Amino acid sequence: EELGPGEGIEDDDFLDTNVKLVLAHQNIIKMAYTCGAFAIIVSALALAFMMAMSRRLVYVALVLSIGVSFTWGTIGIGISPKSFVPITGIIALMLTVGYMFVVWDRIPFASANLTTALTGVRDNLGLVGVAFFFQFLALVCSIYYSFTVVGLHNVFHENGAYDDQTIVVVSLLLLVSYYWTYQVLRHIVMVTVAGTIGSWWFGQPSALKETFTTAAFYNFGSICKGSLFVGFVQFLRQITEGLRPNRDDSAMMCFYECSLFIQEKIVNCVDNLADSFTPWAFTYVGLYHYGLKEAGHKANELFETRGWSRIVTDDLISSVLAMVSLVIGGLSGSFAVILQALDGHGLTSFGHPVLSSFTIGFVVGIVLSTVLFSIIDSSVCAVIVCFAGSPVEFHRNHSELSHEMRNAWKEVWPGSLDVENVGAGLV
C-alpha cells in the first residue's frame, strides 16, 4: 500500500520526538544522580570536618563559606561569565561576609552548645548512619521528582491541550509534594537524633534503635503533620510581627481602635498556631513522644518558665548550617553546569541548558546537605531543651561540658542561669 502525501513524515516525526524525550529523561536522571553523588561526598566531608572541629566550627564554617562562595563565583565566571551563576556566587559571598560581622559576638554561645551536641553524636555514631540512609532516600526522591517535572513540562508544552491555570496548579502541587517529602525525611532524622541525645544526656544506654522505630512508626503522623505546617506557620508569624498592636495615642481614635482590634485578632490567631506548630515540637516529640500539638505547647511553656523565649530565637547555628548547605548547593549547581558543558546532549527541551542544569544541581545539593546536617541542628536543639529542663542531670553525667556551657551562657546571656532545674515538672 502506498503512503499518502506526508503520512510517512508524520510517523517519523512522532518517532523522533519520542526518542528525544527519552534521551532528555535519561540525561535528567544522569544529571540528578551525578550531582547527588557529588553533594553526598561534599556534605559528608563537611560533616566530618564539623565533628572534628566542633569548638572552632562556627568560626571556620563562616570563613570557609566565604572562601567557597568566592570559588563558586570564580567557577561561574570561568564557565559562563554572562549567566546568573557567577552573580549568585557573588551575592552569596556578600551575604556571608555581612552575616559574619553581625553574629561574631554570639559565636562562643553557639560553639558551647555545638560542642556538647556533637559530643553526644560522636558517642552515638549510629545517628550518622541513619542520616546517610535518609540522605540516600532524599536523593531517590529528587531523581524521581526531576524526572516527573521534565515529563510534565514536555507533555504540557507539546500537547497544547492544557491552559496556563492547569499548568500552574499542577506545578504547585508537585512542588508542595516534593517539599513535604523532603521535610518528612529530614524531621524523621531530627526526631531520632533528639531521642538519642536525650538518653545520652541522662547517662542511659543508647536509645537509637527504639527512638528510630518510634519516629518512623508511632510518631510518624505527628512528623508528617508538622512537616507540612510548621514552616508555613513560622512564615506567617514572621509576616504578622509587623502587625503586632502598638497602643500609642492616636488622633483618629475610632479608626485606631478598629484597626487595633483586627490586628490583635490576626496576631493572636497566628500566635495560637505557632504555639503548636513550632520547630521545637520535633525535639519534644523525640525526647518525650508527645503528639505534635502538646509537644509544641510544652516546649514553649518550658522556655517561658526559664525566661529563655528570646534566647531560643538565636538561630546562629541553623543559619551557619543553612549557609554551608547553600554553598554546597552552589557548588553542586556549578558542577552540573560543567557536566552540561562537557556532555554533547541537551538536558531538556526548556531551551536554557545552563539554567536547567544549575537548578537541578542546586536543588539536589541543598536538599541532600540539609538532610545530613539535620543531625547537627537537631542535636543542638535537644541539648538546649535538656539544658533548660534538666541541668542538674547534665552536670552529674557530663561535668566538663556542663561547666563549658554555663560559662558561655553567662558570658553571652547574663542572668539566663539564675533559676536551676525548673523543668522537671514540665516534662
Image (cartoon, rainbow, N blue to C red):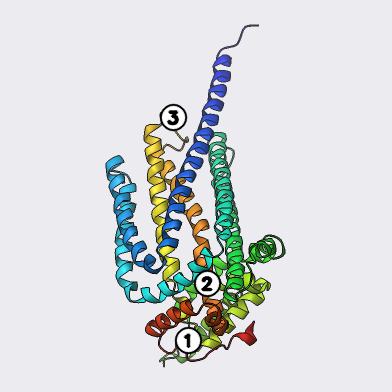
Question: In which quarter of the view is residue 82 placed?
Answer: top left
Quadrant the N terminus occupies: top right
- From the viewer's perspective, is residue 49 above or below residue 426? above
- From the viewer's perspective, is residue 332 above or below residue 28? below
The residue pinned by badge 1 equals: 255
Q: Residue furthest top?
A: 1
Q: Residues within 10 Å of mark 1 (few under 14, many from 20)?
A: few
Tag 2 secondary structure: helix
Tag 3 secondary structure: loop
How far, Cα to Cα, is label 2 from label 3? Answer: 46 Å
Q: Residue furthest right?
A: 218
Decide which of tag 2 and tag 3 comes sooner along the chain. 3
The residue pinned by badge 2 equals: 381
Visible residue check, residue 262: no
Q: Residues within 10 Å of mark 3 (few under 14, many from 20)?
A: few
Visible residue check, residue 340: yes
How far, Cα to Cα, is label 1 from label 3? Answer: 64 Å
Amino acid found under the numbered disc labelled 3: His
Q: Are marks 2 and 1 in contact (CB under 8 Å)?
A: no
